[in-house]
């Protein structure tokens, strides 16, 4: 076991993937000598100079170059410095990479990994803070991964790179400095396997990225109020671990979904749909979403705090859910 | 090269000087205020490039409009924005230009035709092109100016906009501030040309190189471009050769630039340049320049005081403004 940050863990995952496969290369803005704006690729340029490509500020060209190389056997990992800038590469992501396998009748595939630097870093405002995963989970052909701990980040970046399909890898800026234990010999971690982060028997809170850590704090708060909350981290959104969710709901019968992205049509809506389609019988009452409010991310800390979900809001929502249930039964 | 300064009256020269010093001191003070914890968000200081904004804006009329960048404070101040409301925005207070919703990257003053800073590199270029289209549709003589960096000229938005603007002969001035770096990447690592003005050739529009550290040269080149745009002659690409004195953003130490390079450019400081020229002009005395500087200190102290006294926004205000005209969020 080694203790390392989430950023270091991603870097180690990239490093090991580059050592293992000469076709793995990195491409992005200021990821070379500068090591990336958040320092994730620091040191890799020195080690693999011919496989770390610094690009001009040209998101469409850089994602497109990754996709084009992938058509011929490359295994590129592109960095989108702030996932907000993926808007400039939408054609390459959504019309090209996502569709390659399907529209060629399976004759061609596009195994790119795109690192999407996601979420707010605090006062980063409307164009540098977004959580856009639901745009991509809504695009058949793209896989979407959202690791929340250093160990998962390291394991999943390697899985993403080895995966034969385009994978969007959502990394939260506020997690980069989060420390955690990472085993020296990391087991392979397939996509679509969630994890119970904390066991409980009264309610399941499903969450990922930074909000997962808020959910764990909420579960701790709830514990002292006599409510036993289980926290479930799906780790990848597409594919999604339905069985894992079902098993948790079997234990708890109640569902709260929390994420930073806006509520409406966020990935939480899909989780809610899965729960009501497949696990209706297990639910004791209506599920609750504790997600970003339906606004762009504002600049002022007070406003940002109001828009984004935190442990307190999750805690309060669970309390309210339990109270309402008592009221309905009475 | 430069506009003969006899053509400009003393008042106008002093005004150019005042604006440049105002920008410089606004930015230096913002940096201190951020370090002291008053400003929560990113800052990309304009220090070193003041002549570009001030020279260009001096060529404009009230009917003209501007789009800007992440490094936008200078453009906004050059256009005449109020430092009080700018600091209030940076402080994230209610009296800020964007009611604390935008911060440095999104500041706007529509009354001045300042259509906004921009968090997206290259984002303002198509907007200026469209603004120019609308100015012409309305029969206005106004022109649209888009400021952007060398790095932005590698975006599709730059190429698509120049093509469109030239094809339709739109009244736009594309002002590229070539400060030799896009973030930490030097120009020779991000594009295979040195003179960005050459890119105008591909779009059949004039491409002019100006000394971005000389406010009078900027004024001369942009005055010509504005005249051409107003009289139906279409767009111009102006490349201003300049340099940022500081890191890309507050906190960036700029280690990717050599000390010699920085020193060489510091010697070409646009404010020192103008000071030297003005003092050679016997009509202007050191005392007058000192007086301008003293006034600015007072103005900026008052502006920071105003920002600090301005109320914090109420959290629920976060739900307002999602849609125009209603202070309501999306119906849910
Ligand atoms: C579409 C997009 N890509 C990347 C960035 C990150 N970024 C912000 S400023 C900047 C450098 C811009 O360079 P340049 O256009 O030369 O302007 P300068 O900073 O030198 O004023 C980059 C890469 C961004 N804001 N938007
Ligand atoms: Mg630049």
Image (spheres, coloured by chain):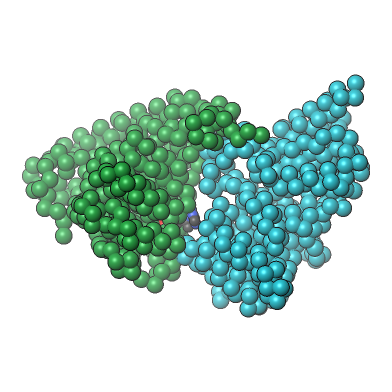
Chain colours: A cyan, B green
B245 over A313 or under it: above or below:
below
Residue at image position (76%, 41%) is A257
Q: Nearer the viewer, residue B84 or A322?
A: A322
Q: Quadrant of the N terminus of chain A?
A: bottom right
Residue at image position (73%, 41%) is A258
A276 over B267 or under it: above or below:
above
Numbered marks: total: 0
On the image, the x and y values in percent for residue B89 come to 44, 35
Residue at image position (26%, 49%) is B56
Q: Nearer the viewer, residue B241 or B141?
A: B141
On the image, the x and y values in percent for residue A124 come to 54, 44
Q: Quadrant of residue A161?
A: bottom right
Confirm whether residue B211 shows in the render: no
On the image, the x and y values in percent for residue A86 come to 56, 57
On the image, the x and y values in percent for residue A6 come to 68, 55
Q: Quadrant of residue B107?
A: top left
* Left or right of B191, for residue A241: right
Q: Quadrant of the C terminus of chain A?
A: top right
Residue at image position (78%, 51%) is A234
Confirm whether residue A89 shows in the render: yes
């Amino acid at each position: 076991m080694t203790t390392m940050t989430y950023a270091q863990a991603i870097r180690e995952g990239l490093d090991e993937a580059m050592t293992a496969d000469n076709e793995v290369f990195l491409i992005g803005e200021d990821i070379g000598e500068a090591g990336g704006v958040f320092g994730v690729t620091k040191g890799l340029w020195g080690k693999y100079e011919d496989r770390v490509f610094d690009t001009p500020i040209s998101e469409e060209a850089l994602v497109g170059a990754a996709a084009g190389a992938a058509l011929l056997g490359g295994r590129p990992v592109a960095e989108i410095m702030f996932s907000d800038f993926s808007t400039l590469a939408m054609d390459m992501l959504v019309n090209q990479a996502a569709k390659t396998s399907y529209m060629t009748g399976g004759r061609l595939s596009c195994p790119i990994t795109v690192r999407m630097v996601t979420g707010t870093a605090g006062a980063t405002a409307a164009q540098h803070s977004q959580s856009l995963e639901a745009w991509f989970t809504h695009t058949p052909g793209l896989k979407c991964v959202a690791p929340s701990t250093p160990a998962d980040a390291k394991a999943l970046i390697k899985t993403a790179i080895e995966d034969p399909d385009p994978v969007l890898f959502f990394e939260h800026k506020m997690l980069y400095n989060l420390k955690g234990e990472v085993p020296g010999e990391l087991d392979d971690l397939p996509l679509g396997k969630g994890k119970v982060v904390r066991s409980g028997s009264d309610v399941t809170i499903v969450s990922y990225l930074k909000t997962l850590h808020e959910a764990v704090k909420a579960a701790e708060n709830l514990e002292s109020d006599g409510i036993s909350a289980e926290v479930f981290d799906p780790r990848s959104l597409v594919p999604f671990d339905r069985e894992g969710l079902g098993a948790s709901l079997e234990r708890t019968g109640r569902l709260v979904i929390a994420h930073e992205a806006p509520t409406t049509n966020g990935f939480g809506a899909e989780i809610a749909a899965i729960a009501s389609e497949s696990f209706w019988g297990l639910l004791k009452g209506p599920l609750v979403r504790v997600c970003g409010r339906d606004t762009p991310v504002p600049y002022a800390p007070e406003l940002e705090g109001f828009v984004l979900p935190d442990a307190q809001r999750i805690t309060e929502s669970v309390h309210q859910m339990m109270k309402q249930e008592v009221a309905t039964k009475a | 090269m430069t506009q003969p300064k006899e053509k400009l009256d003393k008042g106008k020269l002093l005004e150019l000087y005042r604006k440049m010093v105002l920008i410089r001191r606004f930015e230096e003070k913002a940096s201190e205020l951020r370090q002291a914890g008053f400003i929560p968000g990113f800052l990309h200081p304009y220090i070193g490039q003041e002549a570009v904004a001030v020279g260009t804006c001096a060529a404009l009329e009230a009917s003209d409009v501007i789009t800007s960048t992440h490094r936008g404070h200078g453009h906004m101040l050059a256009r005449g924005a109020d430092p009080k409301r700018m600091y209030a925005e940076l402080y994230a207070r209610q009296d800020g230009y964007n009611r604390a919703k935008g911060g440095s990257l999104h500041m706007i003053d529509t009354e001045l035709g300042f259509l906004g800073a921009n968090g997206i590199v290259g984002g303002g270029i198509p907007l200026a092109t469209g603004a120019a289209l609308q100015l012409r549709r309305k029969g206005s003589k106004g022109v649209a100016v888009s400021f952007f960096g060398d790095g932005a000229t590698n975006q599709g938005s730059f190429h698509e906009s120049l093509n469109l603007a030239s094809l339709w002969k739109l009244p736009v001035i594309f002002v590229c501030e070539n400060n030799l770096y896009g973030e930490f990447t030097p120009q020779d690592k991000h594009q295979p040309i040195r003179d960005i003005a050459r890119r105008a050739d591909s779009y059949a529009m004039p491409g002019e190189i100006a000394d971005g550290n000389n406010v009078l040269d900027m004024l001369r080149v942009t005055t010509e471009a504005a005249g051409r745009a107003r009289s139906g002659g279409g767009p111009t690409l102006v490349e201003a050769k300049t340099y940022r004195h500081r890191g890309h953003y507050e906190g960036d130490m700029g280690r990717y630039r050599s000390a010699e390079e920085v020193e060489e450019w510091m010697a070409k400081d646009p404010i020192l340049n103008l000071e030297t020229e003005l003092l050679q002009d016997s009509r202007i005395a050191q005392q007058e320049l000192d007086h301008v500087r003293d006034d600015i200190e007072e103005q900026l102290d008052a502006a920071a005081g105003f920002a600090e006294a301005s109320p914090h926004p109420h959290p629920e205000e976060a739900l307002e403004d999602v849609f125009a005209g209603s202070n309501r969020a999306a119906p849910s």
